[in-house]
Image: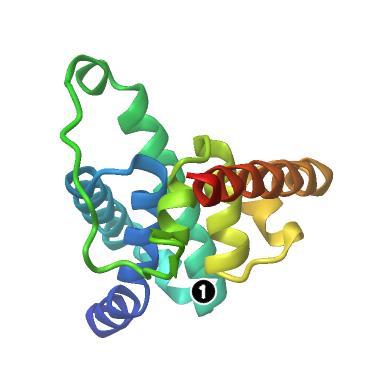
Protein backbone atom coordinates (compact mmCIF):
# COMPACT_ATOMS: atom_id res chain seq x y z
CA UNK A 1 0.00 0.00 0.00
CA UNK A 2 2.91 2.40 0.60
CA UNK A 3 3.97 2.20 -3.04
CA UNK A 4 0.39 2.69 -4.20
CA UNK A 5 -0.03 5.72 -1.93
CA UNK A 6 3.21 7.28 -3.20
CA UNK A 7 2.16 6.63 -6.81
CA UNK A 8 -1.25 8.23 -6.22
CA UNK A 9 0.33 11.14 -4.37
CA UNK A 10 2.75 11.84 -7.23
CA UNK A 11 0.01 11.42 -9.80
CA UNK A 12 -2.61 13.72 -8.23
CA UNK A 13 -0.83 16.14 -5.89
CA UNK A 14 -0.80 18.95 -8.46
CA UNK A 15 -4.47 18.42 -9.35
CA UNK A 16 -5.50 18.58 -5.70
CA UNK A 17 -3.35 21.64 -5.16
CA UNK A 18 -4.75 23.47 -8.19
CA UNK A 19 -8.32 22.69 -7.15
CA UNK A 20 -7.74 23.94 -3.62
CA UNK A 21 -6.00 27.06 -4.95
CA UNK A 22 -8.85 27.80 -7.32
CA UNK A 23 -11.19 27.56 -4.35
CA UNK A 24 -9.19 29.46 -1.71
CA UNK A 25 -7.00 31.79 -3.81
CA UNK A 26 -4.28 31.36 -1.21
CA UNK A 27 -1.01 29.44 -1.52
CA UNK A 28 -0.65 28.66 2.20
CA UNK A 29 -4.22 27.46 2.55
CA UNK A 30 -3.82 25.35 -0.58
CA UNK A 31 -0.69 23.76 0.83
CA UNK A 32 -2.51 22.93 4.07
CA UNK A 33 -5.55 21.56 2.31
CA UNK A 34 -3.45 19.42 -0.02
CA UNK A 35 -1.62 18.00 2.95
CA UNK A 36 -4.88 17.28 4.81
CA UNK A 37 -6.39 15.57 1.78
CA UNK A 38 -3.47 13.19 1.43
CA UNK A 39 -3.38 12.51 5.16
CA UNK A 40 -7.03 11.48 4.87
CA UNK A 41 -6.20 9.29 1.89
CA UNK A 42 -3.44 7.63 3.91
CA UNK A 43 -5.87 6.97 6.76
CA UNK A 44 -8.49 5.61 4.36
CA UNK A 45 -6.21 3.18 2.58
CA UNK A 46 -9.21 1.20 1.27
CA UNK A 47 -9.62 3.99 -1.28
CA UNK A 48 -6.24 3.03 -2.74
CA UNK A 49 -7.79 -0.21 -3.98
CA UNK A 50 -10.05 1.71 -6.39
CA UNK A 51 -9.09 2.61 -9.95
CA UNK A 52 -7.27 5.89 -10.58
CA UNK A 53 -10.35 7.72 -11.88
CA UNK A 54 -12.36 6.83 -8.79
CA UNK A 55 -9.47 7.81 -6.54
CA UNK A 56 -9.22 11.20 -8.27
CA UNK A 57 -12.94 11.79 -7.79
CA UNK A 58 -12.61 10.84 -4.12
CA UNK A 59 -9.65 13.21 -3.74
CA UNK A 60 -11.60 16.05 -5.36
CA UNK A 61 -14.61 15.51 -3.10
CA UNK A 62 -12.38 15.54 -0.03
CA UNK A 63 -10.55 18.63 -1.34
CA UNK A 64 -13.79 20.53 -1.85
CA UNK A 65 -14.97 19.57 1.63
CA UNK A 66 -11.64 20.64 3.14
CA UNK A 67 -11.88 23.98 1.33
CA UNK A 68 -15.41 24.54 2.58
CA UNK A 69 -14.39 23.62 6.12
CA UNK A 70 -11.48 26.01 6.05
CA UNK A 71 -13.49 28.90 4.66
CA UNK A 72 -16.27 28.35 7.19
CA UNK A 73 -13.93 28.11 10.16
CA UNK A 74 -14.09 30.93 12.69
CA UNK A 75 -10.31 31.29 12.53
CA UNK A 76 -10.42 31.98 8.79
CA UNK A 77 -13.16 34.57 9.22
CA UNK A 78 -11.01 36.53 11.68
CA UNK A 79 -7.80 36.78 9.66
CA UNK A 80 -7.01 39.32 6.98
CA UNK A 81 -5.86 37.61 3.76
CA UNK A 82 -2.39 38.30 2.47
CA UNK A 83 -2.42 38.97 -1.27
CA UNK A 84 -0.19 36.67 -3.27
CA UNK A 85 0.30 35.39 -6.77
CA UNK A 86 0.98 31.78 -7.72
CA UNK A 87 4.11 31.43 -9.83
CA UNK A 88 3.76 27.79 -10.84
CA UNK A 89 0.31 27.86 -12.43
CA UNK A 90 -0.73 27.77 -16.04
CA UNK A 91 -0.39 31.32 -17.23
CA UNK A 92 -1.81 32.32 -20.61
CA UNK A 93 -1.50 35.97 -21.58
CA UNK A 94 -4.44 37.80 -23.11
CA UNK A 95 -4.04 41.57 -23.46
CA UNK A 96 -1.59 41.72 -20.53
CA UNK A 97 -3.95 39.73 -18.29
CA UNK A 98 -3.93 36.00 -17.75
CA UNK A 99 -6.92 33.75 -18.23
CA UNK A 100 -6.21 32.38 -14.77
CA UNK A 101 -6.46 35.87 -13.26
CA UNK A 102 -9.78 36.36 -14.99
CA UNK A 103 -11.11 32.98 -13.86
CA UNK A 104 -10.02 33.79 -10.31
CA UNK A 105 -12.25 36.88 -10.41
CA UNK A 106 -15.31 34.65 -10.69
CA UNK A 107 -17.33 33.74 -7.59
CA UNK A 108 -16.18 30.53 -5.90
CA UNK A 109 -18.94 28.27 -7.20
CA UNK A 110 -18.25 29.33 -10.79
CA UNK A 111 -14.46 29.02 -10.43
CA UNK A 112 -14.96 25.46 -9.24
CA UNK A 113 -17.06 24.27 -12.19
CA UNK A 114 -14.76 26.06 -14.68
CA UNK A 115 -11.75 24.38 -13.10
CA UNK A 116 -13.30 20.92 -13.14
CA UNK A 117 -14.67 21.27 -16.67
CA UNK A 118 -11.83 23.01 -18.51
CA UNK A 119 -8.72 22.26 -16.48
CA UNK A 120 -9.56 18.72 -15.36
CA UNK A 121 -11.70 17.76 -18.39
CA UNK A 122 -14.58 16.33 -16.40
CA UNK A 123 -17.95 16.20 -18.11
CA UNK A 124 -21.06 17.67 -16.48
CA UNK A 125 -22.23 14.28 -15.18
CA UNK A 126 -18.91 13.66 -13.42
CA UNK A 127 -18.89 17.19 -11.99
CA UNK A 128 -22.42 16.68 -10.66
CA UNK A 129 -21.21 13.53 -8.87
CA UNK A 130 -18.20 15.33 -7.38
CA UNK A 131 -20.32 18.27 -6.21
CA UNK A 132 -23.33 16.18 -5.18
CA UNK A 133 -25.50 18.23 -7.50
CA UNK A 134 -27.71 17.65 -10.52
CA UNK A 135 -26.41 17.67 -14.08
CA UNK A 136 -28.83 20.49 -14.91
CA UNK A 137 -27.49 22.59 -12.05
CA UNK A 138 -23.90 22.04 -13.22
CA UNK A 139 -24.85 23.00 -16.78
CA UNK A 140 -26.53 26.15 -15.49
CA UNK A 141 -23.50 27.07 -13.37
CA UNK A 142 -21.18 26.49 -16.35
CA UNK A 143 -23.34 28.68 -18.57
CA UNK A 144 -23.44 31.47 -15.99
CA UNK A 145 -19.71 31.14 -15.36
CA UNK A 146 -18.98 31.48 -19.07
CA UNK A 147 -21.21 34.58 -19.29
CA UNK A 148 -19.49 36.17 -16.29
CA UNK A 149 -16.07 35.28 -17.67
CA UNK A 150 -16.97 36.89 -21.03
CA UNK A 151 -17.95 40.07 -19.17
CA UNK A 152 -14.69 40.07 -17.22
CA UNK A 153 -12.65 39.58 -20.41
CA UNK A 154 -14.54 42.39 -22.16
CA UNK A 155 -13.96 44.73 -19.22
CA UNK A 156 -10.24 43.91 -19.22
CA UNK A 157 -10.03 44.51 -22.98
CA UNK A 158 -11.66 47.93 -22.60
CA UNK A 159 -9.19 49.06 -19.95
Query: Is residue 59 something one can see in this rendering?
Result: no
Residue drawn at point x = 31 percent, y = 53 percent: 37
Q: Nearer the viewer, residue 157 or 117?
A: 157
Picture residue at 68% right of the left edge, 50% below the top = 146
| Visible residue check, residue 86 | yes
Q: Tell me residue 82's x, y (percent).
A: 15, 34
Task: Locate residue 59, reporting x and y percent.
Answer: 43, 59
Query: What residue does disc 1 label?
Result: 50
Say what secondary structure mark 1 lies in: loop
Give neighbour class at mark 1: few <14, some 14-19, many 20+ (Cα, 10 Å): few
The residue furthest right is 136
Q: Is residue 59 left or right of residue 121?
A: left
Considering depth in this image, is 26 or 66 the residue closer to the camera? 26
Q: Residue at x 31, y 69 (%)?
A: 13
Number of labelled discs?
1
Say which quadrant the N terminus sits in: bottom left
- Furthest residue toward front: 158
Front in this rendered view, residue 96 or 40: 96
Where residue 41 appears, as percent x and y from the top left, is: 33, 60
Front in this rendered view, residue 151 or 84: 151
Side of 105 relative to 110 (left or right): left
What is the image's colouring?
rainbow
Residue found 54% across the figure and 46% down from its top = 158
| Quarter of the image where one finds residue 79 | top left
Q: Is residue 51 left or right of residue 117?
A: left
Image side of residue 107 versus residue 26, left or right: right
Classify 40 as above or below 23.
Answer: below
Amino acid sequence: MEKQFIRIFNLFKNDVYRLSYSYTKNISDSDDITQNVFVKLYKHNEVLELDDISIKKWLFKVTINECKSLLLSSWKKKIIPFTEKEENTLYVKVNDNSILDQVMQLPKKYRLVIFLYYYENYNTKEISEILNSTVTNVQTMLSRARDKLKDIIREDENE
